[in-house]
Amino acid sequence: MLRKQNFPGSILRCLNSPFGWHAPGAATAALSLLTGMFVASGCGASADNAIEASLDENFQLRIGQSAVISSVDMEVGFEAVTSDSRCGKGEQCVWEGDATVRIWTRLAGGNKEENVLHTGSKMPSAVAFAGYTVRLVALHPIPLSGRVIAPSAYIATFRVVHGTSGGDVVH
C-alpha cells in the first residue's frame, strides 16, 4: 500500500542529517531517537510532497507535488505545465487557447506512466489508467495579458474516478 510518508525513513534521514545526533550509550541513544522523531516531522514534510486524496473528489496539486489515493493504491503527480496559450483574463480571443499539463500516474510499487492533459475543449483532458480515469478539472491562475506565470504559481485541480469512458480520455 502507498503511504504518504515513510516515518522510520524520515527519522533515519534526520538522525543522519546535521540536525541529528550520533550519541553512544543506551540512554543518550533513546534521547537521540526521541529528539529525532520531533525533527523528523519537519524533515519528512520537506522530503515528501505527497498529499492524501480521495476517489471521486477534486484535489489540487502544485508542480512537483503528488496525491496518494490509498483506497485504490494509486499516486498521481503533477510534473509541469509545458505550454500555456489560454486566453488571458479580460481579453477577447478568437480561440480559447490551451494549456498542456504533464502528469504521471502509478500503482503501488509500479513504474510511473507519464501523460499529457489539456485544458482546451478540443484536446484530451483525462487519461485512462488501471481501470480509472484521471481528469484535469482546472488550471490556475488564468493568464493575464503581458504577464508570465511562474511555474511555482500553477495549481492544477484533478479528479480520479472509477471507469475509463468518455470522449476526451486518452486510452
Image (cartoon, helix red, strand yellow):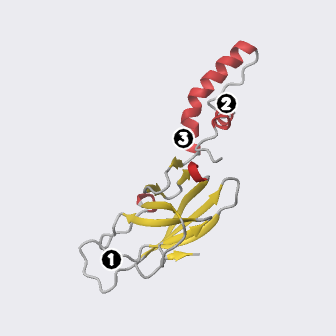
User: Disc 3 or disc 2, which is closer to the eye?
Assistant: 3
The count of marks equals: 3
Residue found 76% across the figure and 15% down from its top: 25
What's the residue at 44%, 55% (across, down)?
Answer: 59
Comes first in the chain, label 3 or label 1: 3
Give the residue drawn at x 59%, y 32%.
Answer: 40
Q: Which residue position is annotated with label 1?
A: 87
Identify the secondary structure beneath mark 2.
helix
Q: Residue 83: x percent and y percent? A: 47, 74
Of mark 3 and mark 2, the one earlier in the sequence is 2
Disc 3 target residue: 45
Q: Nearer the viewer, mark 2 or mark 1?
A: 1
**How many C-alpha atoms fall within 10 Å of the one at disc 2: few (<14), some, or many (≥20)?**
many
Q: Is residue 125 above or below residue 7?
A: below
Q: Is residue 82 above or below residue 60?
A: below
Q: Which of the 4 image quarters holds residue 9?
A: top right
Q: State yes or no: discs 2 and 1 in contact (Cβ < 8 Å).
A: no
In the image, what residue type sits under mark 2?
Leu
Left or right position of 79 against 89? right
| Type of amino acid at the residue the image marks with label 1 | Cys
Looking at the image, tell me whether mark 2 or mark 1 is earlier in sequence order: 2
Placement of 98 over or under 163, stated as above or below = below
Q: Which mark is residue 15?
A: 2
User: Mark 3 to mark 1: distance in Å?
Assistant: 36 Å
The amino acid on which the numbered mark 3 sits, given as a three-letter code, is Ala
